[in-house]
Image (cartoon, rainbow, N blue to C red):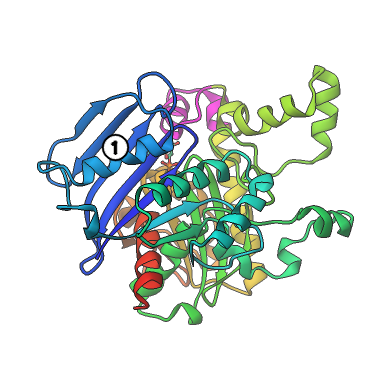
Amino acid sequence: MKVLVINCGSSSLKYQVLEMETEELLCKGLVERIGIDGSVIKHEKIGMDKWVLETPMKDHKDAIGHVLNALTDPEHGVAKSMDEIGAVGHRVVHAGEKYAGSVLITDDVIKALEECIDLAPLHNPANLQGIAACKALMPNTPMVGVFDTAFHQTMPAESYLYALPYEYYTKYGVRRYGFHGTSHRYVSLKAAEMLGKKPEDLKIITCHLGNGASLAAVCGGKVFDTSMGFTPVAGLVMGTRCGDIDPAILGYVAAKEGKDLAAMDKVINKESGVYGLSGVSSDFRDVENAANEGNEQAATALKVYAHRVKSYIGAYMAEMNGCDAIVFTAGLGENGITMRKAICENLENLGIELCDERNNVRGKDTVISKDSSKVKILLIPTNEELMIAKDTYEIVTGK
Ligand code: AMP
């Protein structure tokens, strides 16, 4: 069966088609500038050159219409007709406390996801538009929702509750939800496979270090804690997000700078992180280059970044009473050789020993710890699309 995976943003859309019997990627693509001038679809059948088509697309339905045309194109397509696409898997950011796993999309599910718009106002509406467009264009094809928050739903109350008045949780759903769940799930399962053990028998700390970044403590295959919170701004230092700060800073700086809450929200989401700290860039490569050229502020930003990851690793080892493996994934986790070294430095007393030679690698499944390291350190490129496709296939076929 071929499964179409869709990840809808507000003005863009990423997609892939996978052949599930072999888990082979058949094609992938990106639609950009949906609803604005210069709409474009960039489609790539694996093994062929990219096919780029600029054509007006007024909304997500138009965009998905063009995706379906590309999928069935005689030259660039991967299916003779739409009937060959057995199911669609949608990435959805927020399912609140409703779903702890992926589900077949029904009208009730759509209603539940609409109720979560308040919790993810930038993401859920776009995800729902993608679902509505597929429903209109392929009414007989089953669809599955795969949620970023779902894997974290196993967290106990001591991990997810904030020490605020309890009624904010019961009335407004103010709690830690966590994000990047599909990635944490994929790499924790892959880590178990690489270590030849069952997920139930392992304590793993998964480090998803991309533009957005989060850690998860995965104990016996279930998330015990994660660093992102009510929103994805919490936890680690990120490209432009501040991660954990003293909450009183917001009011203090707002008063000093004459900013309102919306302006402060922009500061913590778009103007902070390594970008704000270094004054150079949100891209770690630029910050590393600047640091190598003697920019001390950039060097300090990287130190703050590594320090925060380290402190979460320590916290999660304490929470789980140990750890069998640490996994690095996403852009920086997969490629940042010096950052991985900085994070793992001086952790020998915790049984964490990185091997410099093995660490000199990018983007492939591999063990990068010394043989003597009690805690195995793994590098695993994430593959959220494959995880979405697998869930979709399993739910639709019951296999
Ligand atoms: P992602 O959000 O997973 O695509 O990750 C994007 C981040 O990965 C960017 O901010 C880059 O700074 C970082 N990144 C990608 N390649 C490298 C590299 N070779 N070295 C260091 N950082 C990298």
Verify whether residue 171 appears in magenta: no
Which residue occupies 35% across, 41% down? 64
Towards the viewer: 63 or 199: 63
Q: Position of residue 375 (x, y in %)?
A: 48, 69
Give the overall secondary structure of the magenta segment: helix
Q: Is residue 134 left or right of residue 262?
A: left
Q: Which of the 4 quarters of the picture holds residue 385?
A: bottom left
Q: Position of residue 363 (x, y in %)?
A: 31, 50
Q: Is residue 82 above or below residue 130?
A: below
Which residue is denoted by mark 1 in the rendering?
A: 66
Q: Position of residue 33 (x, y in %)?
A: 40, 27
Which residue occupies 53% across, 31% down? 299
Q: List the single residue furthest toward the left.
A: 75
Task: For label 1, count other residues whose C-alpha is less than 10 Å away and answer few (under 14), some (14-19) or many (20+).
Answer: some
Quadrant where the N terminus sits is: bottom left
- Asked whether residue 362 is in view, the answer is no
Towards the viewer: 73 or 89: 73
The residue under label 1 is which amino acid type? His
The quadrant of the picture showing ligand 1 is top left
Q: Is residue 208 above or below residue 123?
A: below
**Numbered range of the magenta stretch:** 280-300
- Asked whether residue 311 is in view, the answer is yes
Q: Position of residue 355 (x, y in %)?
A: 37, 58
Q: Is residue 336 left or right of residue 76?
A: right
Which residue occupies 40% across, 73% down? 192
